[in-house]
Image: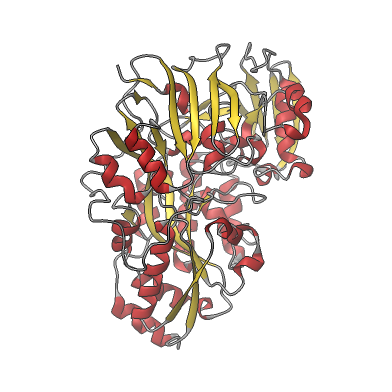
Amino acid sequence: MTPSPTPVGRRPRGRRGRFAVTTAALTALAALAACSGPPKDAGVSGAELKLSASTPPARGEIDSFTWAVYAEPPTLDYTLAFDYPQNTVLSNVCESLMRWTPGLTLQPGLARQASNPDPTTWVYDLRAGVRFHDGKVMTADDVVYSLGRQRDPKNAAAWAQNFQNVASIRKTGPLQVTVKLKKADSQFPQYMATAAGVVASKSGVEAAGKDYGTSGDLACTGPFKLGTWSKGQSIELERFDGYWGTKAKAKKAVFRVLTDPSARTNAMLSGDVDGGYLIPTESYGRLRDSGLGTLYFGEGLSTVNVNITDMKGPLGDLRVRKALSLALDRSGFVKAGLGGAGTATSSLTTRAAWAGASEQTRKAAFDALPPAAQDIEKAKALIKEAGATGKTLTVATSSIGQDVSLLATAVQAAGTKIGLKINLKTIAPNAFTALFTDPEAREGIDMFPLTYYDSITDPLDLLTNFKTGAYLNFAGYSDKGYDKLVDEATAVYPRDQRLKIETELQKRAAEQLLWIPVAEWPTAVFLNKRITGAPTTIAYMYYPWAADVGATE
């Protein structure tokens, strides 16, 4: 299972660009006993799991609040903001052309409007009078420069892939920027609400030079500016009173780095920190029953999966992949690995990602999927039919989070029941993300737990991963028909028309089981009684959520 609600380095998206894959928070969680699971009171029941878009609005201002993060960002350079720690902080300091809302919809950000006069042109008309933290006014030149940094190969930007279809970015007015695409791209305008669309001051970034993102001014426009950064301990944000929008309710937001899950939980229970996202699943019960605050859940756009990394061995036979999928105890994993806060699923995409689809399209996307329930006898028959009885497979596991360790154990149990031999290979927490970036790290591994979250509210964000040559297509799957459908969907702007194409992609991906889907996983956030206002959804990755946090009374 991946993140013990501390999703692991989300996706090392590194050079891959548009994918958001989490894998379980880079936390140093003590290794769990193979079949043990959390204490009986560690989770929540389905009846308790009510998703909301936000917490109650704040009633007043507050001097400061303290927030727990599971790891220190290596940098706050927006071009490298690919993981939870970076974006949780940066979303309050730097802003993008467009903006996600707590309800995961798109709205204008630093661009007051975006227009699409023809399929390959996007025009962004900028807000007037927006100031950077150093007082300088934002211009079209700053936008051209900021987006250009994402495209510059020298920067090795995490979001570079999102710009591969960009032909040019030009200033077409004092407050207007025009992006010309090589071909129609429905995904590009959506990514302008993520860190891919951040605007920073050209002069500010150039003045910082190589130190940009690691100290001093981040040269951005958000409701907070970077204050004191005590390496290895905390990052302080100070309210920016020259902000163009609604000013933050807190004068200061302090992010405390607490890498140990137990330490984070204890800090919330003691009042040393006021709240946090990515709550360890094994702590749900303690926080819920503490009487010191409230544990909330919201849409996470996250699915927990088993990533197939080698199809040269037994997993190259589709019948073996289907058998493992049929043998998995998804409901048991949700209860033990996700603390009951999740839904067993055979879908690679979340239902929330299809929110913009018509009822007919959404129904088509899910009705064709195989059942999520266990069927051991059918699985055994498939293994026998494939001649795979007694064959050996290796699954990577890690103490990085109980979602990772318990899912690996669940795969082992499933395989054993149907006649396979499943070996577990333990990977150190600090090396687990190498599975995403280094082919050599995957040598000898047939599959590993992977939690993926969408960076945009579009199923194509995930489904693109199975296109030939895609970064997370570790199994090397290639299907010209699938590739063609990805290109067709990418080129279609009308949402429901595009989603109809994506239903076929969903069906094909589900049939091939290149990732074995296990569960949907909501976002969790805890707030003590002192503060309120934070959104509960994964919007906090790109929305200035800390500005909404204030006093409960």
Left or right of residue 243: residue 540:
left
Can you give x and y, in whole percent of width and height, for residue 172 in the image?
A: 75, 21
Q: Is residue 315 visible?
A: yes
Quadrant in the rendering for residue 492: top right
Left or right, 180 with reference to 528: right
How many marks on residues? 0
Q: What colouring does the structure picture have?
A: secondary structure
Name the outermost residue toward the left.
47
Q: Quadrant of the C terminus?
A: top left
Indicate left or right for 213 with 451 as reference. right
**Vertical position of residue 93 compared to residue 434: above or below:** above
- Residue 181 appears in view: no
> Which residue lies at the image location 54% right of the left edge and 36% below the top edge?
233
Q: Residue at x 29, y 73 (%)?
A: 375
User: Eyeballing the image, is 29 above or below 185?
Assistant: below
Q: Residue at x 37, y 42 (%)?
A: 265
Closest to the observer, 13 or 428: 428
x 22%, y 43%: residue: 48
Q: Is residue 503 left or right of residue 124?
A: left
- Residue 206: x and y in percent read 78, 27
Q: Position of residue 180 (x, y in %)?
A: 72, 34
